[in-house]
Image: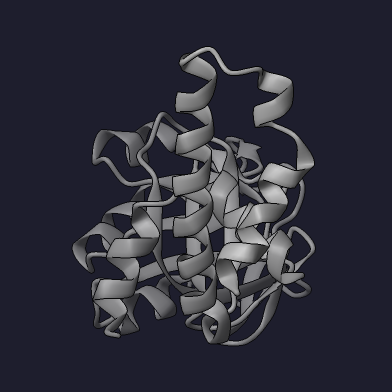
Amino acid sequence: MSVLNLLDRFAALDTNTVSDALDFLGLPGATVGLRPLWNCPKIVGRASTVLLAPKSDTAPTAHLITPVVEQIDSDDRVLVIAGGIEGISCWGDILANAAASKQVRGTVIDGFSRDIDGSASIGYPVYGRGVTMISARNRVVQIDAAITISVAGVDVSENDYVIADNCGTVFVPSAYIEKVIDLGERIARRQDGMVEAVRSGRSVAEVMHDTQFEAIHVERA
């Protein structure tokens, strides 16, 4: 199945359902604390990974993340940034405008953003730990890209799949994306049926009994 078809199916799910699918498969991927930094839409795409670190000298360098943005040549990318420093920005509105011009779908930061109103004004989604006004210049540098990074305790590799919405951010290893989507679609159908059952008057204790969730395993057989 093509990447675009997978992304369309992935986008029809939400982070709760994807997290449940990962649980059923015994896979990590759900994070805590990486929330929308403005009232932005859900983002779904493939990771372009960036690793940052504190700057240790005074020599001028290319501004962090700019080399990665310049090299993007497809419209399925989400920038995923690790190595942020508490209270120091690693994203801002100039970068947001550059990313938007490259059709990047959004940015997930294990760190902080400044100028968040600038990102919001162009409709560019940003997820992260919080906002700040303190610049990254002379404080943070990019040390690598397109590698496996640790984001909120989850290993994320280049081209892994990303979904982020109001509940947070989830990463799915590219090798498992079809299994996660297939299972996520079954979970979503079952949970929709459970909602309808409760609305129709069935006992919520019966509807939400563990056996009802375990039935998903039977459907997989």
Residue 21, located in which quarter of the rendered image?
bottom right
| Residue at 42% across, 78% down | 68
Whole-percent x, y for residue 37 in the image: 51, 36
Whole-percent x, y for residue 172 in the image: 57, 70
Seen from the viewer's position, the closer of residues 46 and 5 is 5
Whole-percent x, y for residue 2 in the image: 27, 84
| Residue at 35% across, 40% down | 41
In the rendered view, tell whether residue 38 sits above or below residue 112: above
| Residue at 53% across, 12% down | 201
Q: In which quadrant of the rendered image does the N terminus lie?
A: bottom left
Seen from the viewer's position, the closer of residues 69 and 10 is 10
User: Can residue 31 be seen here?
Assistant: no
Residue 83, located in which quarter of the rendered image?
bottom right
Q: Viewed as shown, does residue 36 lie left or right of 173?
A: left
In the rendered view, tell whether residue 175 sits above or below residue 150: below
Q: Viewed as shown, does residue 106 lie left or right of 139?
A: left
User: Can residue 16 be seen here?
Assistant: yes
Q: In which quadrant of the rendered image does the C terminus lie?
A: bottom right
In the rendered view, tell whether residue 203 sits above or below residue 9: above
Whole-percent x, y for residue 84 in the image: 69, 58
What count of labels does the image hold? 0
Seen from the viewer's position, the closer of residues 87 and 50 is 50
| Residue at 50% across, 25% down | 197
In the rendered view, tell whether residue 40 sits above or below residue 182: above
Q: Viewed as shown, does residue 168 lie left or right of 55?
A: left
Q: How is the image coloured?
A: one colour
